[in-house]
Amino acid sequence: MAIIGTGPTVDGVNQCVPFTFNAAADILAMYVANYGAPGTKYGEVATLGPIGLAVTLDTTADTQVRLAHDGDFILGKIQSFENRVSEGTCVVTVVTKGGMSFPIATGHTVAIGDIVGGCTAYPGNVQTVTPLTGALDQLPKENLVTSVPGDGTCVTLLR
C-alpha cells in the first residue's frame, strides 16, 4: 500500500487472519501496569498496554498466547485486549498474517531482510534472530523485515 508522501509499505496490508486467544499472565500484567486491575465491566477493551506487541503460542494452556521472548517465533501481533470478567478470562485478538509493525527491543538493531523473533529483556518487542536456531528450526523464514522507518519499529511481513 502506498501512502502519499511516504512511498510503498506492507504495514497494514492483508491483516486478514485475526484469531481470538486467551491472554497469558504476562499480557494481563502489562494491561494492569497501564490501566490498573481490570474492572468488573464486561467487555472492557484496552487501547494501550499490550496492543501492538508480538506474541507466540503459550504451550501451558489451550488456545493461549503470551508475549514473545528469546527463541520464540512470532505468531502475530495483538490487535485488541478484552476483559471478559463474566467468563473469568481475558482474551486478545491476534493478527497472524500480513504486514505489520512491531517495536524493536531497546539496544537491538534490525535491518531490512532480517528475520525477527521475541526478546526476553523486552517481552513483546522483537530482535534479529539467526534463521534455523532454537524454535525457528520449525518455522524458518516465516517473517521478513521489509522496512525500518527509524521510529523504533520495524515493518514485518508475516507469511
Image (cartoon, helix red, strand yellow):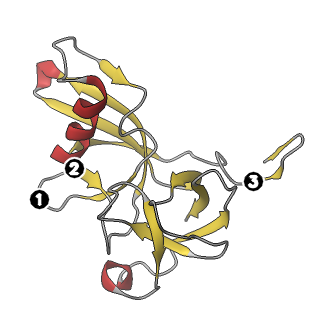
Residue receiving disc 2: 64
Q: Pick whichever, 44 or 18, lies toward us.
A: 44
Q: Quadrant of the C terminus?
A: bottom right
Task: Name the residue rendered at 38%, 44% in the picture.
Answer: 19
Left or right? Give the position of 18 relative to 57.
right
Whether pointer 2 and pointer 1 mark residues with C-beta atoms closer than 8 Å, the reply is yes
- Classify mark 3: helix, strand or loop: loop
Q: How many marks?
A: 3
Q: Regarding mark 1 in the picture, which secondary structure is present there?
A: loop
- Residue at numbered disc 1: 60
**Up-down relation of residue 77 to residue 140 (above or below):** above
Q: Are marks 1 and 3 in contact (CB under 8 Å)?
A: no
Amino acid at the residue labelled 1: Thr
Helix, strand or loop at disc 2? Answer: strand
* Residue at left offset 36%, top offset 35%: 49
Label 2: few (<14), some (14–19) or many (≥20) C-alpha neighbours in 10 Å:
some
**Marks 3,2: beta carbons within 8 A:** no
- Which numbered tag is attached to residue 9? 3
Amino acid marked by disc 3: Thr
Q: Estimate the x, y position of residue 80 in percent, counting from the top left.
A: 40, 33
Mark 3, other Cα within 10 Å: few <14 / some 14–19 / many ≥20: some
In the image, what residue type sits under mark 2?
Answer: Gln
Asked whether, in this view, residue 52 is left or right of residue 154, the answer is left
At 17% across and 62% down in the image, what residue appears? 59
